[in-house]
C-alpha cells in the first residue's frame, strides 16, 4: 500500500505569492525593463512612485527621502513640489526644496529646481529669495531678479 501526498505539491498554479515561495519581492518595472534588454531607469521609477503617492504627504516624504539617498535629487525635489500642493505641507515642502537645492553641486540645476518650485508655490517668500540669490550668483536674469526682489 502506498500513500499519496497531495498537500506537499512542489508545483503551483500561480496562486501562491512570490514572497511565500521565498523568491523575494517581485518588481514588475524592473522585470519588464530587463526583458526588454535595458536596465530600469531610476528617475522613471521614482516618477512612477511619485504618481502613485500623489495626495499622500507621508508617502511623498518617503519617496523623496529614498530618491535623495540614492542620488536622484531631481526626483526628491519633484516629490516635494507635489507635496507642496497638499494642504498644510507647503512650508515644509518649500524648506526641503531649499535644502535639496543647497546640496546640489551644479548651480544651474539648483536654480532650475527652485524655478519649478517657485512656479508651483508662487506665494513662498523663502523660495523666491533663494531663487533670487542663485540668480545673482550665476548672473542669470539680473533684471528679473531685481524685479522679483522689488516685491
Image (tube, rainbow, N blue to C red):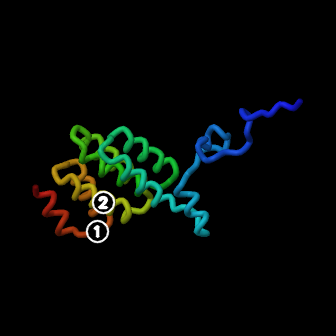
* Residue at 15%, 60% in the rendered image: 148
- Does residue 98 show up? no
* Residue at 50%, 54% in the rendered image: 71
The quarter of the picture where residue 115 lies is bottom left
What crowding class fits label 2: few (fewer than 14 Cα within 10 Å), some (14-19), or many (20 or more)? many
Structural distance between the alpha carbons of marks 1 and 2: 8 Å
Q: Against 56, is 112 above or below?
A: below
User: Which residue position is annotated with label 1?
Assistant: 139
Name the residue furthest front: 1
* Residue at 25%, 51% in the rendered image: 127
Please give the label number shown on residue 134: 2
Position in image of residue 64 (x %, y %): 41, 47
Q: Is residue 7 left or right of residue 138?
A: right
Please give the label number shown on residue 112: none
The quarter of the picture where residue 104 lies is bottom left
**SS at mark 1?**
loop
Position in image of residue 106 (x %, y %): 42, 62
Amino acid at each position: 500500500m502506498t500513500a499519496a501526498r497531495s498537500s506537499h505539491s512542489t508545483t503551483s498554479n500561480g496562486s501562491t505569492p512570490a514572497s511565500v515561495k521565498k523568491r523575494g519581492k517581485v518588481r514588475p518595472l524592473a522585470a519588464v525593463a530587463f526583458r526588454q534588454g535595458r536596465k530600469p531607469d531610476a528617475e522613471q521609477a521614482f516618477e512612477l512612485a511619485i504618481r502613485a503617492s500623489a495626495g499622500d504627504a507621508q508617502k511623498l516624504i518617503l519617496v523623496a527621502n529614498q530618491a535623495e539617498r540614492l542620488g536622484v535629487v531631481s526626483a526628491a525635489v519633484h516629490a516635494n513640489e507635489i507635496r507642496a500642493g497638499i494642504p498644510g505641507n507647503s512650508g515644509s515642502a518649500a524648506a526641503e526644496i531649499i535644502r535639496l537645492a543647497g546640496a546640489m553641486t551644479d548651480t544651474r540645476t539648483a536654480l532650475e529646481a527652485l524655478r519649478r518650485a517657485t512656479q508651483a508655490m508662487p506665494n513662498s517668500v523663502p523660495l523666491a529669495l533663494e531663487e533670487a540669490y542663485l540668480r545673482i550668483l550665476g548672473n542669470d536674469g539680473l533684471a528679473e531678479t531685481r524685479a522679483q526682489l522689488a516685491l
